[in-house]
Image: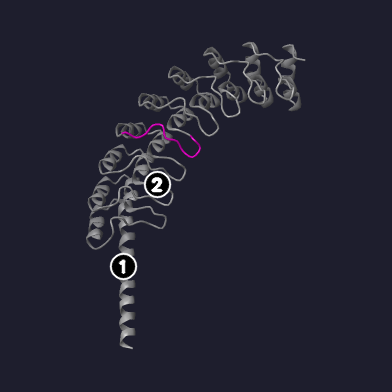
Amino acid sequence: MLTRWIFILITATAFSMAARAADLNRELMDAAVIGDLERAESLLVNGASPNAAGKFGKSALMFAVEEGNEDTVRLLLGRGANVNARSVAGCTALTYAAENGQSGLIDLLIDSGAKTYPKTRAGWDALAMATRQGYIDALAALIRHGANVNTSDKDGTTALMAAAERNDAQALRMLLSADADVHVRNKDGASALTLAACKGHDAIIDILHQAGDNPDAQDNDGSTALHCAAENGHVDTIRLLIAKGANIHHQNLEGKSALIAAAESGQLDSARNLLTLGANPSLKDKKGHTAKDHARQNRFRDIVRLMEGAGAH
């Protein structure tokens, strides 16, 4: 009987101590959020873990970084917090710093041993985070510390592609200066230039072309930047791409030209400008359909009349 009571007493004591530790850890995370340095220090002295983390693995250090509480970050690092700990979603203190544009904390974390290459569950590393959010100083800090500018997320999107889609010329130039590769393709086979063309970001196209990106590079279905510009109605982009040597008559794997893509998508201005620039209205896709056929099928009557005026049969 005595042994049983001793066991119960030990179990109850252990449970009480565990509950106390959990309380201290929760309080430490709260202190990290609000930047209460004195409270955080007291909690650590009284047994809170510097690696205290919540249900989803977000640590006190991550909370402090996210809120920009540098003194608390320094305290936690000084008490042994794991600078490379990861949440359930794969986030680290560094990705939080990058996502929030905390360039000073980026320097501090990397100087304290943070790795630049861990990625979140979506495949975004700190460099991708900074680029996607448009934080130039954070991006510069990561490049300065040697972050890989050519890593990609689970869709094959690189930081260069993200900058191109965002129309962020400053980030784009910074990445190119750090040897970002313009020839990398995403999972669909699209380059940064193609993605810029889909959005109509002409200044970005100009920068990428100067850096060596080919306006006639083909994606997985054989389409080029011109196809994407045409089907999205970016008339100025169409002119720019052709001025840079894009083949106006290129047909993708289905045999569709940029003119057919414009007609199929109901982009009257795209179709008109392509014809003005010399597109052949008689080109047929692999099924024998012309741009006029696609326009008629989709009831784009203005485009049908345009094609008829251009001599299409």
Q: Secondary structure at mark 1?
A: helix
Looking at the picture, tell me which residue is in the foreground, 86 or 217: 217
* Residue 2 pos. (x, y %): 30, 87
- Name the residue carrying label 1: 20
Looking at the picture, tell me which residue is in the foreground, 265 or 248: 248
- The residue at 28%/52% (across/down) is 81
- The quadrant of the picture occupied by the C terminus is top right
Question: Is residue 200 shown in magenta?
Answer: no
Query: Could you classify mark 1 by the number of other residues whose Cα lies within 10 Å: few (under 14), some (14-19), or many (20 or more)?
Result: some
What's the distance in space between the residues labelled 2 and 1, CA to CA? 27 Å
Query: Could you classify mark 2 by the number of other residues whose Cα lies within 10 Å: few (under 14), some (14-19), or many (20 or more)?
Result: many
The amino acid type found where label 2 is placed reads Cys
What residue range appears in magenta?
146-156
The amino acid type found where label 1 is placed reads Arg
Left or right of 22? Residue 46 is left
Q: Earlier in the sequence, mark 2 or mark 1?
A: 1
**On residue 232, which mark appears?**
none
* Residue 201 pos. (x, y %): 50, 23
Q: How is the image coloured?
A: one colour
Q: Main secondary structure of the magenta part?
A: loop
Asked if residue 98 is positioned above or below residue 21 in the image, the reply reads above
- The quadrant of the picture occupied by the N terminus is bottom left
Question: Is residue 152 shown in magenta?
Answer: yes
Looking at the picture, tell me which residue is in the foreground, 136 or 57: 57
Q: Residue furthest bottom?
A: 1
How many numbered badges does the structure rendering display?
A: 2
- The residue at 51%/32% (across/down) is 186
**On residue 91, which mark appears?**
2
- Would you identify the image quadrant in which residue 291 lies? top right
- Would you identify the image quadrant in which residue 11 lies? bottom left
Asked if residue 48 is positioned above or below residue 262 in the image, the reply reads below
Q: Secondary structure at mark 2?
A: loop
